[in-house]
Image: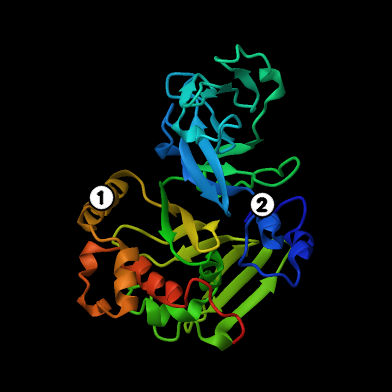
Amino acid sequence: MAESKVSAQQRLKVVAGASFEQTGPGTPAGKYLRRFWQPVYHSVDLKPGRPVSLRIMGEDFTLYRGESGGSGGAVHLVAPRCPHRGTRLAAGRVEGEDLRCFYHGWKFRADGQCIEQPAEESFFAKNVCIRTWPVREYLGLVFAYLGEGAPPELPQYPAFEHFDGLVEIDSYLRECNYFQNVENSLDMSHVGFVHGDNVASFAGIGLGRALEAEESDWGVSYTFRRPDGRSRVQQFGMPNAFYLTALPTESDAGWQESLFWWVPIDDERHVQFTVHRLPLSGDAAKRFSERRAARRAQVDLAHQELAAQILAGTLHLQDVDAKRVDLVRLQDDIAQVGQGIFASHNA
């Protein structure tokens, strides 16, 4: 995991003794999370000239890609509404790298400065500016820095940039507080029960006496000693990032390495962004990609909706066709959303 110039432990002082669940503007945990670069969108899904509305940690934003260049311009993150009459800027029109409001045509540069007010003949445009935030594209994701002041360097993961293999980008929505997913990532004991039907599960996985954790400036190294004496080491990076190694679940594929981020939409919903690194190339990579595409074509049931039915008692997990759903995500939905939107931490 990459380290920041200011240690996570130092920054954690900001939220010592405070709740990690509430992340809206002005909350201690919200201020803390905003001091880190957060993934907010898939690069491939952000089309030139097609602005989108985003909600991250209880705040609204407008994200768009300019139209400069043959394949589109730079990515920009700006305020959600026009300061004139409050219309959503995501409904507006991209012109080059600028954004024009749908309602009265006020036009804003990517740095937020208003440069045109058609009805007012731009009389006071120089006095109008909307807020903007730094964004970067990396590993197929759009990262944003939502904190105050100059951003830190964007963490780099060279092993995911330069290697002979495949990189997959993924994300999903989970309708509970993000911190439940953070906790779940470090709870290896749940694997043998929640995911007991997975080929990567085995008897004794997550045994308490076989677990060790070592804190560092950037987070925690988490080690599980297997019965055969081998160790599995995972890295948790404060405040919401995780590096995971997983046993092979398909032929041709070796160990899969993944980077996870759990980003709050608000206090009741969050998105998990994932970058997978698979050591496959040539014909093996082609076969794997074909199998993956065929598998995804079978999935036509939303795991979130099935979980809601199971938790309501109108459906049982054993009655779900595992070929038609992402089973691991469904199982985690049941476990995490089943705790309620906010899990109790008093036990």
Q: How is the image coloured?
A: rainbow
The residue that label 2 is drawn on is 34
Q: Is 174 left or right of 263, judged from the image as shown?
A: left
Q: Nearer the viewer, residue 302 or 278?
A: 302
Image quarter of residue 216: bottom right
Per the image, label 1 sits on a secondary structure element best described as helix
Badge 1: residue crowd in 10 Å (few <14, some 14–19, many ≥20)? few
For the point 25% across and 50% down, the residue is 293
Identity of the residue furthest to the top in this view: 121
Give the Cα distance between marks 1 and 2. 36 Å
Q: Position of residue 29 (x, y in %)?
A: 68, 62
Q: Position of residue 157 (x, y in %)?
A: 58, 48
Q: Nearer the viewer, residue 158 or 264?
A: 264
Badge 2: residue crowd in 10 Å (few <14, some 14–19, many ≥20)? some
Q: Is 342 left or right of 16, judged from the image as shown?
A: left
Q: Position of residue 135 (x, y in %)?
A: 60, 38
Q: Position of residue 98 (x, y in %)?
A: 54, 22
Position of 22 relative to 339 (above/below): above
Position of 88 relative to 54 (above/below): above
For the point 63% across and 69% down, the residue is 221
Residue 140 visible somewhere in the drawing: no
For the point 44% across and 86% down, the residue is 204
Q: Is 309 left or right of 26, judged from the image as shown?
A: left
Marks 1 and 2, the one that precedes in the sequence: 2
| Dot label at residue 283 | none
The residue that label 1 is drawn on is 293
For the point 59% across and 64% down, the residue is 235
